[in-house]
Amino acid sequence: MIFKEAETMGVHGVHEGKESSFKRMPNTEPPFTLGKIKKAIPPHCFQRSLLRSLSYVVYDLSFSFLFCYIAITYFHLLPSPLAYITWPIYWILQGCILTGVWVIAHECGHHAFSDYRWVDDTVGLILHSALLVPYFSWKYSHRRHHSNTGSLERDEVFVPKPKSRIAWYSKYLNNPPGRALSLGVTLLLGWPLYLAFNVSGRPYDRFACHYDPYGPIYSDRERLQIYISDLGIFAATFVLYSIAVSRGLAFLIFIYGVPLLIANGFLVTITYLQHTHPALPHYDASEWEWLRGALATMDRDYGILNKVFHNITDTHVAHHLFSNMPHYHAMEATKAIKPILGEFYQFDDTPIYKALWRETKECLYVDPDDGAPEKGVFWYRNKF
């Protein structure tokens, strides 16, 4: 674990806290190339199997439909007090499974699902639309995130702000109740707000929205596929509307709505913790390079949920280096690259609930170190 006790602070090594310190990852140019990292990975790790990838889709959807069948068929037969236990259990289990489905669709967007791009896009469009995610719209913005990770000017999501650009009310939320409120809103609404209003995303010179084919996020050649994404959302919404009409709004909320909110919360948690940590640097244009930015991400340990989430949680460093690698080879690849990366590999096994609260407290804005020669290297701060 990189969270360490320390008593002193070095400008380039440790970020001082009240009781504990974080060993920062190096922000210098890595002593290795992407080619050297790739050579350390067994070649079969880059091979995509359509049948194996489809097996994960079948596996996840089988559990999802099984949970749904049990809830619809048996929950109404239970005595009333048990419903207060069974429904939350269903929501959590279904939310976890839907997060795994989301990860597979994300893999389709990286062309890591199969050797056939049309298959990847078809599967990804269906799965993401079912989760109310505009597949192509997010695929393109996410691709730019991978192309610009760690850049304060060009990264697409969870872009930290320097202290000078922090909202005036932020200091009033810098307390336990304020952090709890901010965290609750982020987990509950962060994902739809990002898609609809680009909240926490890269600033553009005009309104940016993942549903707008003519928005600043997309180029002219991408606009047709944004329309296709929107059609997928309309189709999914129509199916959900039909269910609500035939079975009732409460039925739809209990079976689909609450698990979707939980899946969205997991998605925000996973993404936030991958890119937010006091040990991770961000760079402005004077310092940013692709490899340095791609390495500035954090692997985490979600316990048994690592498998449920197809290891997007504990192999994210490898994913940012080779995003077209199938998830079922990512663990092997991660083990292979650790000796090459050395201190450039970042992993934190702090329990997720503790890490989420800690990062919400410690990572409020970014600024360069006072007196540091690298004015383009920014680190998280929390003092106003």
Image (cartoon, grey):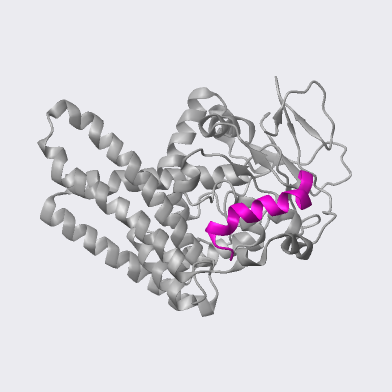
What number of labels is visible? 0
In the rendered image, the vertical position of residue 290 relative to residue 340, given as above or below:
below
Q: Residue 2 at x, y = what percent? A: 70, 34
- Quadrant where the C terminus is found in the figure: top right
Question: In the figure, residue 134 lies in which quadrant?
Answer: bottom left
Q: Is residue 209 visible?
A: no
On screen, residue 78 versus residue 50, left or right, reads left
Q: Residue 175 at x, y = what percent? A: 55, 24
- Residue 115, magenta (yes or no): no
Q: Which residues are magenta?
A: 324-343
On screen, residue 182 versus residue 332, left or right, reads left
Determine the residue positioned at 51% across, 29% down: 179
Q: Residue 315 at x, y = what percent? A: 60, 50
Determine the residue positioned at 80% across, 49% down: 376
Question: In the figure, residue 219 lies in which quadrant?
Answer: bottom right
Q: Nearest the camera: 99 or 171?
A: 99
Determine the residue positioned at 48% across, 60% down: 106
Q: Nearest the camera: 357 or 319?
A: 319
- Type of secondary structure dominating the magenta stretch: helix
Determine the residue positioned at 45% across, 65% down: 52
In the rendered image, the vertical position of residue 209 relative to residue 71, given as above or below:
below
Q: Nearest the camera: 283 or 312?
A: 312
